[in-house]
Amino acid sequence: MNSELHRLIKREELSGETFVLHFERNDFQFSPGQYAVLRDTESGEGREYSIYSGQNDDYLSFLVREIEGGEFSHFLRNISIGTEIKIEGPMGFFILDNKVKAGHPVWFVASGTGISPFHSFVTSFEDLNYQILHGVRFVDEAYGRQVFDSEKYCLCTSRHDKGDYFGRVTHYLEKHPVDSHTICYLCGNSQMIEDVSDILEAYGISPENIRTEVFF
């Protein structure tokens, strides 16, 4: 497991509260879908973030949402280019199985910054047979949308009707059945994952074909 210093080389602003940090990779090896711990070298404080970059990228990237009152996300928002922080990992088992890599139909369902592992999947594997639902509040939260095939991507917005679908991902899935042989990956808040899992199981998808990663 890596536990080394990585230098920040770029900050990419996506919305008023969300940004991507790009670090020197330093030969950090991971499987798309895994996460790492970003740690302040001075305070020792750290937090887990899914890896946003693809496995063949020259840099190591993380999508971060600054949380009101969240000391660590505030720290990450304000670190200067050139700052080194410790990155520990990779960790986790939210990775694609060989059937999906070989073209088996797969659905990705994300809420908010839960899009991170799917961004890594799609930028790492070009020929995935996927559909993706991304549930957000407003259209400016369509983080990294440009990497997804526009015909396979649906932005579900809950606060206004300027996305691809007005409503939550659960509302979309209730109206658009998913084939029972589909493998599904869910990433985001626990309530979304619980509700979507119930819908998918009602369509006959077996629990072992519903893979989940909860973001707190």
Image (cartoon, helix red, strand yellow):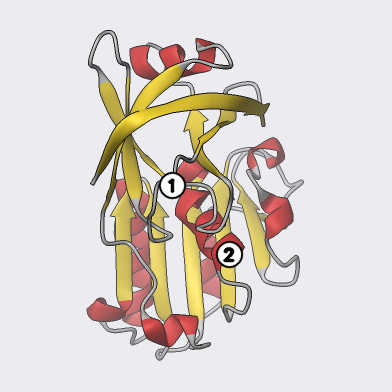
Q: CA distance from mark 2 to mark 1?
A: 21 Å
Evaluate if marks 2 and 1 touch, with contact meaning CB atoms under 8 Å apart: no
Q: Quadrant of residue 71?
A: top left
Q: Is residue 201 rendered to the left or right of residue 62?
A: left
Q: Position of residue 163 (x, y in %)?
A: 72, 50
Q: Which residue is mark 2?
A: 122
- Whether residue 170 is visible here, answered yes or no, is no
Q: From this view, report whether residue 154 is shown above or below residue 20.
A: below
- Residue name at image x 51 percent, y 47 percent: 52
Q: Is residue 16 at least partly visible in the picture?
A: yes
Q: Amino acid at mark 2?
A: Val
Task: Label 1: state its secondary structure.
Answer: loop
Disc 2 secondary structure class = helix
Q: In terms of depth relative to the viewer, which is nearer, 45 or 116?
A: 45
Q: Is residue 127 above or below residue 39?
A: below
Q: Which residue is mark 1?
A: 27
Q: Quadrant of residue 98?
A: bottom left
Q: Nearer the viewer, residue 184 or 93?
A: 93
Percent x, y of residue 171:
52, 61
Instruction: Give whichever of 126, 177 is nearer the camera.
Output: 126
Residue type (three-letter) at the residue carrying disc 1 = Asp
